Amino acid sequence: MLKRNYTLAGLVVLVVAMVACQRDPDDVVDPTPGSGGGDDVQVDPSSFPLDSLSSYGFFTGPLAQMLPKASVLPYDLIDPLFTDYAHKQRFVWMPEGSKATWVSDDALLDFPVGTMLIKTFYYDGVLPANERKILETRLLYRTSSGWEFADYVWNDAQTEATLYMDGLNVPMSWQDDQGTVHDLIYRIPAQAECWTCHKNQNIATPIGPKPRNMARTLDIGGQVVDQLPHMEQVGYLDPSHPPISQVMARWDDPAEPLEDRVRAYLDINCAHCHSVGGHCDYRPMRFDHAESEDPVQLGLCVPPEDPIQPDMTYIVSAGLPERSMMHFRLASTAVNARMPLLGRTVVHEEGLALITEWIESIDPPCP
């Protein structure tokens, strides 16, 4: 419970994302990991972006199997950003002899120039054949001045992905593990949309790969490894750093304290915009896990600035989800009301249930 001074007593370290349904089945990643550049991977800054995904040479065998070459390392997050229940598969490639460095538990790893972050979005149970369908692969390429984007849209045959940066709406019908059919219009972002979510101080930057959100185990080719020490072992992370002091909670783990799960969820889904230099810099809240121990940063008893819903008395109205702007925005799919603004078109029901439970638990009520 939050006492009258509204201190989030139980909130400690953790972070986020969302998806009971989206939780990657790719906690198991094949095959064996890489160990530094080479392998005829083609990453030439003068020719980036290439016209097709296969041209980079990140993978071996049929492209849709996403079998990385030895220098392409699988990685994963404790909590991924929610994207309409899509699954995600992540890899990182760095130039030979280079490695990322640790800034702090709360900061993005400092990736060397030439790094490529590779993230593929797909659905399982896609109808009518109840099969896997890959929709897009996004690349983030580290330059001396920031990061550049490239998005590759997969063909129907699932044999190639082609560069396309103008945005695309893809109708999707898929069935979850419980047999429920979901229909949605999946949004492949245009370049301007990528910039909206990834900008920080007018420099493009990744969102998820921070030590606090990467300190997890990962099954790589049948071998369970501690991800960050494994990155050190294969030469992709400088080992000269202090022990990690913060590890994010899984937002969807009921064994974790409720407030910790909420802070984690809001961190991964909201903090990249609600931050200094982010798209929603002008808003008063800072949802980053490092700052959100102060409940005011989560909007508790903070009046909203926008008149979207006059009956919403606070961003978070203690004990009253129906009077809380945060709840209203997370429950909305209207373009002018939903939060996050981009990256989702449907309600994340499990995430909304978490926020509802948290708001109802807060006591005493706001003035």
Image: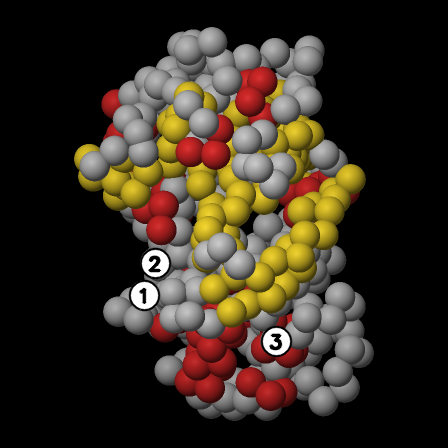
Residue at point 56% right, 55% down? 83
Helix, strand or loop at label 1? It is: loop
Q: Is residue 31 left or right of residue 95?
A: left
Q: Residues within 10 Å of mark 2 (few under 14, many from 20)?
A: many
Q: Nearer the viewer, mark 2 or mark 1?
A: 1
Q: Tell me the CA gap for discs 2 and 1.
A: 8 Å
How crowded pointer 1 is (Cα within 10 Å; few <14, some 14-19, many 20+) is rated as: few
Q: Are marks 2 and 1 in contact (CB under 8 Å)?
A: yes
Residue marked by disc 3: 331
Which x, y percent locates residue 110? 48, 28
| Mark 3 in CB contact with mark 1 (< 8 angstroms) | no
Residue 228 placed where, x, y %?
31, 34
Q: Residue furthest left?
A: 223
Instruction: Describe the element under mark 2 as helix, strand or loop.
Output: loop
Residue type at mark 1 is: Asp
Task: Locate residue 340, reporting x and y percent.
Answer: 64, 61
Residue 362 visible in rendering: no
Q: Given this view, does label 2 or label 3 mark the residue nearer the observer?
A: 3
Q: Which residue is mark 2?
A: 249
Q: Quadrant of the C terminus?
A: bottom right
Position of 363 with respect to 202 (left or right) is: left
Is 246 above or below relative to 146? below
